[in-house]
Amino acid sequence: MPEHKIIFTGPVGAGKTTAIATLSDIPIVRTDEMATDMTARRKPNTTVAMDYGVMNLDGGGRVHLFGTPGQERFDFMWDILTQGGLGLVLLLDNSRPKPFNDLLFFLNAFRKFVDRTRLVVGITFMDERPAPGIPDYSDQLRALGYSAPVFEVDARRREDVATLVEALLYCIDPGIVDHV
């Protein structure tokens, strides 16, 4: 049975843990600790190593879902978690003051991984702040030399998160999507 590994990344509070929990067919593994820095203003706990879940595919295959810590001080985990990964789901919080800065930061941080795999971008919290819009993100990606699907997502909605994973898998191998 096929086994796939996908990485979720993005800034603190963008919805990585929630997205993995929403999509996982098993209870997820969380490595949350109490936030003690500026992260505490956004949420009480933060991921310090990884989140992990599994999405079962029709026909018996599985997609292993790994979430990175959003804080740069835990960036040593980023290289570890991307080993063997097929692609990157970048979640960006549209309500943050400068979401394009987050886009640039994470693309630079994961450049080596994205250059040899695939990328899909999910924009969260567009209900709180509708601008910039999806076309603006697509324009930014093109200006940075990337071609990637961009979607508005609510990390609490299985359909939204599944669309991200399906789009990523389709970019990798269109035949995989027949089993999702």
Image (tube, rainbow, N blue to C red):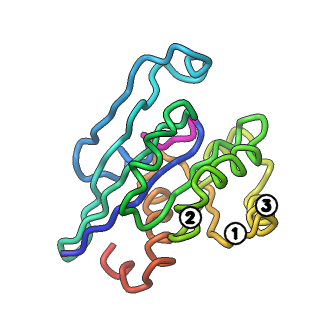
**Callout 3 crowding tier (Cα within 10 Å): few <14, some 14–19, many ≥20:** some
Q: Counting residues from the N terminus, which is met first, the one under dot 1 or under dot 3?
A: 3
Say whether marks 2 and 1 touch (CB < 8 Å): yes
Disc 1 versus disc 3: nearer the observer: 1
According to the image, label 3 marks what residue?
Answer: 140
**Callout 2 crowding tier (Cα within 10 Å): few <14, some 14–19, many ≥20:** many
Instruction: Write the start and end of the magenta stretch as one range.
Output: 12-17
According to the image, label 2 marks what residue?
Answer: 114
Horizontally, residue 58 falls left or right of residue 47, namely left
Look at 57% across and 54% down and name the residue there: 110
Say whether marks 2 and 3 touch (CB < 8 Å): no
Look at 55% across and 33% down and name the residue there: 71
Q: Which quadrant of the view contains residue 33?
A: top left
Look at 29% across and 59% down and name the residue there: 55
**Callout 1 crowding tier (Cα within 10 Å): few <14, some 14–19, many ≥20:** some
Instruction: Please state the horizontal and vertical placement of residue 88, each as a whole percent of the image.
Output: 50, 60
Q: Counting residues from the N terminus, which is met first, the one under dot 2 or under dot 3?
A: 2
Disc 3 residue type? Gln
Disc 2 residue type? Val
According to the image, label 1 marks what residue?
Answer: 146
Instruction: Please state the horizontal and vertical placement of residue 24, each as a whole percent of the image.
Output: 30, 51
